[in-house]
Amino acid sequence: MVELIGQLAPTEGYTKSPLDGVTLMRSNHALAKTPALYEPSIVIVAQGRKRGFHGGEAYVYDAQHYLVLAVPLPFDIETEASPEEPMLGLALRIDPTATAELALALDEEAPQESSPPQTLFATRLDERIGDATVRLLEALASSADARVLGPGIVREITYRVLSGDQGGSLRAALTQGSHFARIAKALRRIHDHYDCGLDVATLAGEAGMSVAAFHIHFKAVTATTPLQYIKAMRLHQARLLMIRNGLSANTASERVGYESASQFSREFKRMFGRSPLEEARHLKDVLSLSPPVRHATSEWRVLAS
């Protein structure tokens, strides 16, 4: 995995792969605890170590453990890495519809005891997931292999996660008509429409809850309030726009729905500990997004062997 990811992600930060929904990660330096935003995803680390902090709990994902997030979630992360041993990994975005179909099929084939839904969890990486991950990385070296073989391998990894030790928690989050599932739907709406006018009463109504019940269940899932979550989502997206698109703080704040530039700057510094310009400079390499690396197939196979 280390050799393959090193070839696919030669530069620090995030690198797109030829397969939509799969992103490579590389960090050449340690990163102290900092706010981050993850999509619903399966995160596999081949080298180095990352820790996520949410709701008073710490989640370690490294060469022995992978991380799963059932919903879009802002939380704190720290990274152990060095130029000699960079952190290398990949993230597979969870498609709620396709994953829910797999979860339903699993429940029909082998129903398991009811598990409480979980927002995120870290689980030991087993041999089958590791083997599928290597095959996925090999496929990503060729745009044709990625297009033809990649989706099936991603589906296989997702299936292994759903049927693994803590997969019941993810299955419950995706398939049960529970409060968790309704809050997850509201989170996806916020994630997709953070730049629009979002009010709690409308979100609660769409979730089929009273405003009071929506607040209670929202905080149980995210460890924060709806308004705080919306604010965090907008600030994280603004940070990415400044780093990856080169936008100014004023333009980025307008793009994510802020009407006051001064309010944006105050809230940005309160969350990240730096001004927008300072934060963009500080994390320019760590959060950059590079295009897919192109390899000649014959050359890659020599390197990979």
Image (cartoon, rainbow, N blue to C red):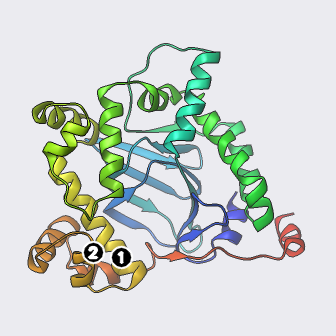
Q: Look at the image and tell me whether residue 282 can be seen.
A: no
Q: Tell me residue 91's x, y (percent).
A: 55, 55
> Which amino acid type is shown beneath numbered disc 2?
Arg
User: What residue is disc 1 on?
Assistant: 241
> Which amino acid type is shown beneath numbered disc 1?
Leu
User: What residue is disc 2 on?
Assistant: 255
Q: Quadrant of residue 186?
A: top left
Q: Residues within 10 Å of mark 2 (few under 14, many from 20)?
A: some
Q: Is residue 4 left or right of residue 298?
A: left
Q: Tell me residue 144's x, y (percent).
A: 80, 64
Residue name at image x 13 percent, y 74 percent: 259
Residue name at image x 69 percent, y 50 percent: 151
- Secondary structure of the residue carrying numbered label 1: helix
Residue name at image x 21 percent, y 44 percent: 203
Q: Residues within 10 Å of mark 1 (few under 14, many from 20)?
A: many
Q: Quadrant of the N terminus?
A: bottom right
Residue 68 is tagged as none
Q: Look at the image and tell me whether residue 152 can be seen.
A: yes
Q: Is residue 97 above or below residue 249?
A: above
Q: Is residue 223 above or below residue 134?
A: above
Residue name at image x 72 percent, y 45 percent: 152
Q: Is residue 84 left or right of residue 288?
A: right
Q: CA distance from mark 1 to mark 2?
A: 9 Å
- Secondary structure of the residue carrying numbered label 2: helix
User: Which residue is more in the foreground, 21 or 75?
Assistant: 21
Q: Tell me residue 217's x, y (percent).
A: 22, 32
Q: Quadrant of residue 106?
A: top right
User: Which residue is more in the foreground, 222 or 66?
Assistant: 222
Determine whether label 1 and label 2 are within 8 Å by CB. yes
